[in-house]
């Protein structure tokens, strides 16, 4: 089954590290103003999910939400969450760690789109 959001092994390892440090986590991908469209990592329940957010799935056992307006732009793509060296978002938990989450994407194939439409 195709997933709308996936995660690299490097990002899974980093998420595990953050979970040990901060407890349960959640992610939110917005169209962003302050931190652009970076995926933001929060302690679970620290960010209020609203009616204008869509649950895309889970990464490394953490719920991953996206703003509904942003989802409309990206619904034809699979989001691939990765981690790289650099400064994280100022509101995101990885900020002080010298790493940051990034979103890569790829367009779904016609077969994958059909599978998604069946669910």
Image: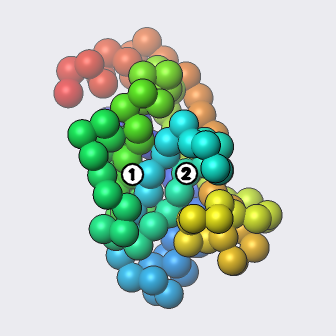
Where does the image place residue 10, in percent across and percent down from the top left?
A: 63, 64
Q: Which residue is mark 1?
A: 64
- Left or right? Give the position of 73 relative to 95: left
Write the residue at 49% across / 22% down. Answer: 73
Badge 2 marks a residue whose secondary structure is strand
- Left or right? Give the position of 99 relative to 113: right
**Residue 104 visible in the displayed image:** yes
* Quarter occupied by residue 105: top right
Write the residue at 69% across / 77% down. Answer: 97
Quarter in which the N terminus is drawn? top left
Query: Does 4 sit above or below residue 115?
Result: below
Q: Which residue is mark 2?
A: 39
Asked whether the beta carbons under mark 2 and mark 1 sit within 8 Å of each other, the answer is yes
Query: Does 85 sit above or below residue 59?
Result: below
Where does the image place residue 87, in percent across and percent down from the top left?
A: 76, 65
**Residue 103 visible in the displayed image:** no
């Amino acid at each position: 089954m195709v997933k709308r959001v996936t995660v690299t092994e490097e990002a899974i390892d980093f998420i595990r590290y953050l979970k040990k440090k901060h407890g349960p986590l959640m992610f939110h991908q917005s169209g962003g103003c302050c931190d652009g469209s970076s995926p933001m990592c929060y302690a679970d329940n620290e960010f209020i999910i609203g009616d204008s957010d869509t649950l895309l799935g889970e990464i490394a056992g953490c719920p991953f939400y996206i703003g509904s307006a942003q989802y409309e732009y990206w619904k034809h793509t699979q989001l691939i969450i990765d981690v790289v060296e650099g400064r994280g978002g100022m509101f995101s938990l990885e900020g002080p760690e010298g790493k940051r989450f990034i979103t890569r994407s790829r367009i779904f194939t016609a077969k994958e789109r059909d599978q998604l439409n069946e669910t």
